[in-house]
Amino acid sequence: MKKKIIIILILFILTGIISWKYFSYRNSLYEQPFYFDLFIAQSLFEKNEKYPWINFWGNSWNKVPNSENRPVKWIYNKKEFEKLDSVYLGFKNISKEKFYYVTWGEPNSRIRINYKIFRNGKIDSIPFDGFGCGTGIYITPLKEGKTAGSKFLNPLMFNPYNNYNLPIKNKSFPDLFKEIYGDSVAINFEQATYSLPWNKVQSQMIISPEIIVSTEKIIESWKKGEYLSNKEFEEEREAGFYIKENGEYKLSSLYEKIKTE
């Protein structure tokens, strides 16, 4: 009888501790939606003792060797990137286990974009330069076989040096586009992902294949009128005319030219 009472007492205490941790965890959540496996991961597994101020999924941005890459299938249509309009990008989980990805509330909202510009046999790399704000980010699950994806404006509709809209309706657009993007441009995307402690694949930044687009293809589409036009892209802002020449950023002479016409 004593043993039963002791066992019941121990179970009662454990249940109380787990319940207390559970409700404390739920009440501590601000932007992060509640998921039970995240509660287990954060409550029972080792915290980051070296950097205690980093949240438990702070290693989602890690780069790993190619042999340890997370199995995902990137979904896109290269031809969409040859037109100045919306493009679709998604990644399908084929890793045979659930993982989480960092988001601002929608797929691709925290996607990173890197560029390589090919001009006269030389390559100018433009790595991702940051979002400027980390407020409101959280992780959301992606089950095996499911896809996270969305449509967004073709990154080539923007100046890669400052992310300002390019003046798509201006007659000087083809010349400006060649000045900025050279002969061709390669784009790849990066997405931070989190693995639960018991997953086989570790947390990491997943990286898409490079999508290489000829600037001539873009210009051909532009000449055919195959581009999205709205007020934002009709405006001719000075910031949209910045180029890089001999390693220095400068305002394209095309800007002064159109202002005097």
Image (spheres, rainbow, N blue to C red):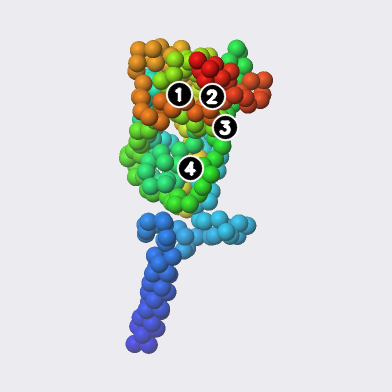
Looking at the image, is mark 1 or mark 2 earlier in the sequence? 1
Looking at the image, is mark 4 or mark 3 earlier in the sequence? 3
The amino acid marked with disc number 2 is Phe
Give the image location of residue 108, x and y in percent.
41, 39
Mark seen at residue 167: 1
Q: Nearer the viewer, residue 235 or 117?
A: 235
Question: Which residue is identified by label 2?
Answer: 241
Question: Which residue is identified by label 3?
Answer: 127
Mark seen at residue 192: 4
Where, quadrant-wise, is the N terminus in this rendering?
bottom left
| Residue 23 in view of the camera | yes
In the displayed structure, 176 sits above or below 99; it is: above
Please tell me whether mark 4 or mark 3 is closer to you in this view: 3
Please tell me whether mark 3 or mark 1 is closer to you in this view: 1
**What is the distance, in whole Å, between disc 3 and disc 1 at their CAs?**
23 Å
Residues at discs 1 and 2 in contact (Cβ within 8 Å): yes
Q: Helix or strand or loop: what does disc 2 sit on? A: helix
Q: Helix or strand or loop: what does disc 1 sit on? A: loop
Q: Residues within 10 Å of mark 4 (few under 14, many from 20)?
A: many
Q: Nearer the viewer, residue 136 or 100?
A: 136
Looking at the image, is mark 4 or mark 2 earlier in the sequence? 4
